[in-house]
């Protein structure tokens, strides 16, 4: 079993990374392999709805998005982390996730995310955490991914990595999140061993309000 943890912050070893590493430690204790994937600081274009991905199998912008979607096929679960910028997710992680999920499903690679558990981790100095948490969880809710929670909303506080490490409740929330993710992955694995398969998919009905 493997979980990919995505660092959507501009600093590779910043506050978000501290939180993700705490989650990863617990996953590793449960014999779950982890990989922290940093989206970097190069510009990430937003989706332009060109639907090239449906024709070629990948996004027209050949960057970190295509790299991640390729890696996603080997993952059993995902955790996406973002700092708070102006009470919301960063522009980079928003563009990243818009294109990751849109291109994967348009290109027929939706099985890389479908029914796989996912979680969001948010880091902030002070406020904006719950709004960002709500924003990023919507990607999972529209793609039939079970959303994994902790004892509290998945967030840490601090202006520096050292501050985050002192957030005792936040660090505990991350550890519990790691154990909860491992638990659900093991439940899914046990279900597969018993022959339990995911529900059959219906063709999508698009209703645009104007018929």
Image (spheres, grey):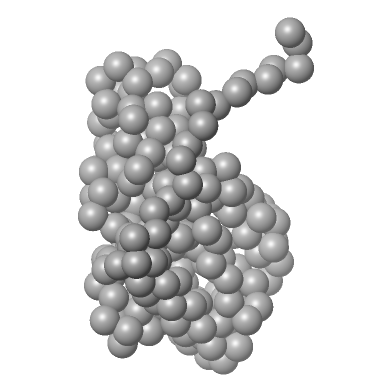
Whole-percent x, y for residue 37 in the image: 30, 59
Q: Residue at x 39, y 54 (%)?
A: 197
**Quadrant holding the N terminus:** bottom left
Q: Residue at x 38, y 39 (%)?
A: 110
Whole-percent x, y for residue 36 in the image: 30, 65
Q: Is residue 200 above or below residue 148?
A: above
Whole-percent x, y for residue 66 in the image: 28, 38
Please identify the residue farthest to the front as the structure is shown: 195
Q: Residue at x 29, y 58 (%)?
A: 75
Q: Is residue 195 above or below residue 157?
A: above
> In terms of image quadrants, where is residue 211?
top right
> In terms of image quadrants, where is residue 22?
bottom left
For the residue pair 35 and 109, the one nearer the viewer reads as: 109
Residue 194 as seen in the image, left or right of residue 97 = left
Q: Is residue 177 above or below residue 197?
A: below
For the residue pair 64 and 70, the one nearer the viewer reads as: 70
Q: Residue at x 23, y 43 (%)?
A: 70
Please identify the residue farthest to the top as the structure is shown: 211
Would residue 12 be seen by someone viewing this image from the given angle?
no
For the residue pair 79 and 163, the one nearer the viewer reads as: 79
> In terms of image quadrants, where is residue 191?
bottom left
Whole-percent x, y for residue 78 in the image: 40, 60
For the residue pair 35 and 110, the one nearer the viewer reads as: 110
Would residue 106 be seen by someone viewing this image from the given angle?
yes
Q: How many marks?
A: 0
Q: Is residue 162 above or below residue 48?
A: below
């Amino acid at each position: 079993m493997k979980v990919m943890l995505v660092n959507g912050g501009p600093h590779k070893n910043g506050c978000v990374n501290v939180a993700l590493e705490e989650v990863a430690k617990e996953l590793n204790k449960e014999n779950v392999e982890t990989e922290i994937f940093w989206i970097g600081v190069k510009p990430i274009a937003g989706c332009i709805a060109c639907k090239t991905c449906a024709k070629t199998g990948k996004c027209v912008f050949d960057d970190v998005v295509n790299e991640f979607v390729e890696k996603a096929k080997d993952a059993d679960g995902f955790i996406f982390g973002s700092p708070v910028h102006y009470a919301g997710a960063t522009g980079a992680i928003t563009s990243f996730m818009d294109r990751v999920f849109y291109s994967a499903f348009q290109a027929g690679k939706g099985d890389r995310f479908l029914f796989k558990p996912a979680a969001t981790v948010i880091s902030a100095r002070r406020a904006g955490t719950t709004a960002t948490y709500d924003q990023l969880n919507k990607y999972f809710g529209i793609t039939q991914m079970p959303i994994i929670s902790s004892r509290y909303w998945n967030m840490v506080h601090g202006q520096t990595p050292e501050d985050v490490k002192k957030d005792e409740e936040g660090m505990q929330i991350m550890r519990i999140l790691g154990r909860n993710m491992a638990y659900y992955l093991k439940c899914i694995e046990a279900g597969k061993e018993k022959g339990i398969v995911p529900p059959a998919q219906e063709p999508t009905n698009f209703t645009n309000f104007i018929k």
